[in-house]
Image (spheres, coloured by chain):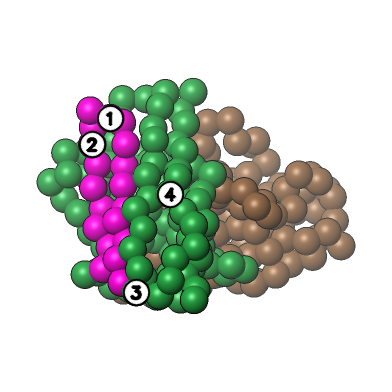
Chain colours: A green, B brown
Amino acid sequence: EVQLVESGGGLVQPGGSLRLSCAASGFVFSGYSMNWVRQAPGKGLEWVSYISSSSSTIYYADSVKGRFTISRDNAKNSLYLQMNSLRADDTAVYYCARAYFWSGRTTFDYWGQGTLVTVSS
Amino acid sequence: DIQMTQSPSSLSASVGDRVTITCRASQSISGHLSWYQQKPGKAPKLLIYTASNLQSGVPSRFSGSGSGTDFTLTISSLQPEDFATYYCQQSYSTPYTFGQGTKLEIK
């Protein structure tokens, strides 16, 4: 059974840092690209970042570029999101999501339960 | 960035109704379109990928269609567990944008 379990969320002051983790199990983690997606309270979904299976390709949303860093450790079956210079509008539930590629197209087929990040003084 | 616009934003319907939600992209995205269902406090769940392919384990009352810029999600006969918020998402190019969501409520 595919499982994605996020951790590392919490309350942080504006300008602070936080590192999120996503522990993967039930599939060959090193064979899949991964994503982070966030959802502000009461709002819709916002894609944050993508990393390919070998970490050779990385993308970010403009809203986090230069502040967030996505990474992975295939030996530990883990995905990470280092978040620096946090702002109030980064407050959200952060989900990790597996990328599934089919016929040259991609979708997010499995999601974790999410971890809440609150940026407030 | 590609903008995704869903309509309606909210919808009231009854058990057994046929419901259609539309999603329009600001430029052609070919078939790079997914639909997700989200219930309160839960993670999104994949329903449809590449516009019309049903994810394994998803009931056949869900279907998707469309290509280019216009897409639809249809629920053929609403069940009580279908009341949720639905999102479309394009994966044609980054940033992988989502629609604003359609909240499906019980009439």
> Does residue A49 appear in the picture of this structure?
no
Mark 3 and mark 4: span between their CA atoms? Answer: 17 Å
Which disc is residue A76 wearing? 1
| Horizontal and vertical percent position of residue A116 | 52, 56
What residue do we see at 68% from left, 54% from top? B40
Q: Position of residue A94 (x, y in %)?
A: 46, 55
Mark 4 nearby-residue class (10 Å; few <14, some 14–19, many ≥20): some
SS of the residue under disc 4: loop
- Front one among B61 and A66: A66
Q: Nearer the viewer, mark 3 or mark 1?
A: 3
Residue B1 appearing in the image: yes
Disc 3 marks which residue? Answer: A15
Please report the bounds of the magenta region as a residue range.
A67-85
Q: Is residue B45 magenta?
A: no
Mark 2 chain: A
Quadrant of image for the N terminus of chain B: bottom left
Q: Is tag 2's residue or tag 4's residue first in the polypeptide sequence? A: 4
Tag 1 or tag 3, which sits nearer the N-term?
A: 3
Q: Which residue is under mark 4?
A: A8
Hey, what amino acid is under mark 3? Answer: Gly
Q: Are marks 3 and 2 in contact (CB under 8 Å)?
A: no
> Which of the two marks, 3 or 2, is nearer to us in this view?
3
The number of numbered discs placed on residues in the rendered structure image is: 4
Residue A73: assigned label: 2
> Could you say where residue A66 lies in the image, as x and y percent from the top left?
21, 70
Seen at 12% across and 46% down, the residue is A56
- What amino acid type is highlighted by mark number 2? Asp
Instruction: Check residue A70 for magenta coloring.
Output: yes
